[in-house]
Image (spheres, grey):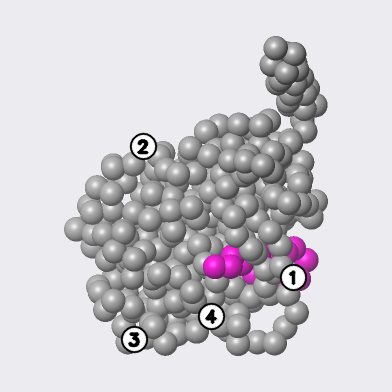
Amino acid sequence: MKKIENTKKSSFLKRIFIKICRLLGYEIINQSDFSSPTLNKSLSETLSIPGKKSVTIPLGQINIKRKVNSLKIILRTCTSELIMDQNKKRIFDCEKNEYTFRTLKSLINSINIAKKNFPNSNFEIIITDTNSSEKDLAKIREILRSSDTKNDLISIEVEKFKDKIKGHYSKAKFSNMANFYNSLLIAKNENADLIYFVEDDYLHTPNAITEMIFSYEKFSSFFSDEIILLPSDYPYLYTKDEDTKIYLGEKYHWRTVSESLVTFMTSKNLIDKYFNELEKMGLEWKDPWEQPLHNIYKSHSCLSPIPSLAIHCANINSIFGVSPMIDVKNLWEKNK
């Protein structure tokens, strides 16, 4: 009988201890069953609390100083050009509209999962389109109607940018510049914590948006600075012998990089700070087109995930395309 009483007393004290830890904001671990009693979770689950703390086993927690309340995704679409100024085929040899449709579907799927992890955050998709057919625009609207995420579709009148964009370019290149410039203007006038600029040939994994937001909160709090996140682990980043740093995100490793393409997530604050630098990409094409972004990376950390959270559907032989060590075909099939 005494043994039973001692067990009950031990169990009672344990519950009191757990409650005290919760009140004080501490997390405890029961390594015997690989769980966290304070969080009521297995250690294999997501332990971080959005906007409050990032918890990584066995490194402990980082208190979040940079809470993400809202994310606006600006997806730049154009279904009439396969690859700008090139005759190359993309992976799976489809028409361009198929990549656009699947990109949008993958984003919606990823947002739906992110909403469950960030129930108090606001999400929105804004599509800015140039030169897509009415049939393709109708299909885009149909896909958007399948989502309960706030959305908007804007058809851009590229003629409005003739007096702004300097130089003579192909129709595809001019439209691309006008679309990015228009996206930048939208971002400048939006009220959001994070802006995610996306090109319409990136297939996102289901956990992409969740990992990016958790990691943004963690890294910006850790660095005490604004940062830039990429969704892709680009092959060309492995062709150069340059120094990098590796960090732990929520479920992925991330490494610092000095270059990127023009699909990236960052804060509204950083866009406002470097608007004049970013605007250069919409005013004049100079190789590399992304140089204004690269200049920003000298002052603010840009990080790329390992393995990739999104696949850039370029030509299979392109060093700017298919990321290594990810099941590309499976991701393609899941976003039909």
What residue span does the magenta drawing correspond to? 293-307
Which element type, helix, strand or loop, lies under badge 1?
loop
Residue bearing mark 1: 245
Q: What residue type is labelled 4?
A: Pro
Look at mark 2 in the image and give the residue it sits on.
148
Residue at the (25%, 74%) spot, across then down? 94
Residue ID for mark 3: 88
Residue displayed at 38% across by 45% down: 152
**How far apart are the two marked residues, 2 and 3, measured between alpha carbons?**
36 Å
Q: Earlier in the sequence, mark 2 or mark 3?
A: 3
The residue that mark 4 highlights is 235
User: In the depicted view, which residue is nearer to us: 194 or 274?
Assistant: 194
Instruction: Say which of marks 4 and 2 sits in front.
Output: 4
Q: Earlier in the sequence, mark 3 or mark 1?
A: 3
Residue 201 image offset from top left, x and y in percent: 39, 67
In space, the residues marked 3 and 1 are separated at their CA atoms by 34 Å
Q: How crowded is mark 1: few (under 14 residues within 10 Å), some or many (20 or more)?
A: few
Tell me whether the residue at label 1 lies in contact with that at label 4, contact meaning CB atoms closer than 8 angstroms.
Answer: no
3 vs 1, front mark? 1
Q: What residue type is labelled 1?
A: Lys
